[in-house]
Amino acid sequence: MTPAEIREEVLDILRDIAPDDDISDIDDAKPFREQLELDSMDFLDIVMELRKRHRVQIPEEEYTELASMASTVAYLEPKMKDL
Amino acid sequence: MIAGPDQLPDSQRIVITGIGLTAPNGNSYAEYRSALLAGKSGVQNYHIRYVGDTLAGICDYEATRHQTKREVRRGTRAGSIGIYCASEAIADSGIDWENTDKSQVGVYIGVTEHGNVETENEVYELKGYDYDTSCWSHHHNPRTVANNPAGEICLNREITGPHYTIGAACAAGNAGLIQGAQMLRLGDCDLALAGGVSESIHTFGIFAGFKSQGALAHHDVPAQASRPFDKARNGIVVAEGGCVYVLERLSDAKKRGAKIYGELAGYAMNTDATDFVLPNPERQAQCVELALKRAGLVAEQIDIVSTHATGTTLGDSQECDALRRVFGKSTKTYINNTKSFIGHAMGAAGALEMSGNLPAFEDGVVHATINVDDLDPDCQLPGLVINEPKEIGPVRYILNNSFGMLGINSVAIIRKL
């Protein structure tokens, strides 16, 4: 997957997790939690969906890499480039 | 022991001051009553995994009236039904909710079962991941803890008083009401949200279990499938639904000039202790008699008996046997059944079935039990209101039966004030 495809995939997950929020104008540089109504359980949904959809395993100590769209795409790129 | 509400101070008398409900044939008190009087069923064709095509009582309330989409996604169907009913009940009560001390509000919600829906869904999902439990949802535990429906109501309405569910099989709707009244009397809360909810149509296990037991209704015409007391009855139509009452002490209700639907005149719960599934008419009759005694009443004073009958061959005739023992000589008591319209709303049944009858205090009409084309002689009861509603004049007392598996029996009596 290309970085653009990974970004689209994360957006798709966010659409499910934050159905009341408009994610079309999300700022990639800002933390998700400043822009969307996400608590820790919602956040775990991002991890779970990546695991379920793409078998991407994210160790707990690396969850902080998923803070913003930019950091998430950068973190996932090596893990998803061959998918 | 309490012997009739007239002997109690107003601070120990419990009244209903708000009602919120969703039933397969109505999403408000007025809509539901009008459907019951019009003979409108809420039973539809339904498909559920593994079991396939069957029938169910399905609700179409507007969940996002009181929840965000995120809350709906995070929670359970039972929680959502509870939130809808509780929110509608609060609004109906006219209470100044914003200025209500939420630490003095208690939430007591009856459930037949809880957790099956989410567990089945997760196991089904997990199969797609070759049973890799790292794919098991982190939402599973908060969704399946037994207090979930009551807890979701508290989260949504920012209630900080006590909350829990009452697991009481199909006696749970009455049990929720009774629990709310008891906690008000104890001073554990000043306002109770009490009743019952059912999400059971979303678990295949309920359907499959009844089917294996030979107790799942089937009929070519969905609206005719739930037919208590009819010779051709062949089982239960499972339904979802909910009904939550706002309960207050009479003294508090008077103080704020609340509209009062009725007073809990008496109640009783007991246990058969004879079988997992089969009912015991002797114990059921004892439960009814105990509720009458506590209300300071005799059978002849009850105007309407709302039966539990679910449409099973044995269960209906056993309840009729129990009712004959208590009301056999009462010429003034009329008897009906709500499941014939909506199916069996499980944990919500008792609360829903009582609320569909409460308007009789105002209009003097007993809604019928429908789908009785050929009355089973075993179910012949004096006063049974068959197929068409009946005007009976002033109604003072309504008694509701709700019984459940493991021999749990509950009876509640509401009187007009």
Image: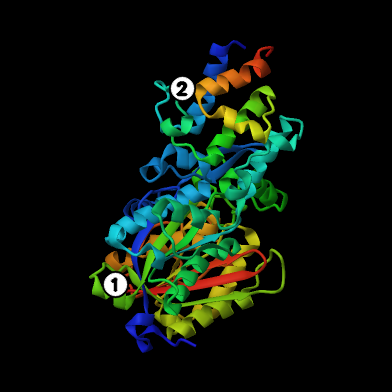
Q: Position of residue B384 (x, y in %)?
A: 46, 67
Question: Horizontally, is B230 left or right of B51 in the view?
Answer: left
- Give the number of the disc on residue A29: 2
Reply above or below: B417 against A63: below
Question: In whole angstroms, how far apart are the C-alphas of marks 2 and 1?
Answer: 55 Å
- Residue situated furthest left in the rendering: B257
Residue at horizontal 69 percent and vertical 52 percent from the top: B214
Residue B240 in the image, given as x and y percentages of width and height = 51, 49
- In the picture, the disc for residue B390 is none
Q: Position of residue B252 (x, y in %)?
A: 30, 74
Residue B362, image x, y percentages: 28, 66
B2 with respect to B55 (left or right): left
Q: Residue under mark 2: which chain is it in?
A: A
Q: Residue A65 versus residue B173: which sits nearer the camera? A: A65
Q: Is residue B119 above or below residue B365?
A: above
| Residue occupying the point 36% across, 65% down | B358
| Mark 2 crowdedness (10 Å alpha carbons): few <14, some 14-19, many ≥20 | few
Q: Within the image, what quadrant is residue B406 found in?
A: bottom right
Residue B311 picture quarter: bottom right
Q: Which color scheme does this rendered protein use?
A: rainbow
Q: Is residue B261 left or right of residue B76?
A: left
Whether callout 2 and callout 1 share a subunit is answered: no
Neighbour tally class for label 1: few under 14, some 14-19, many 20 plus, Cα within 10 Å = many
Q: Is residue B328 visible from the viewing direction of this image?
A: no
Q: Is residue B74 visible?
A: yes
Amino acid marked by disc 2: Ala
> Circle 1 is placed at which residue position?
B253
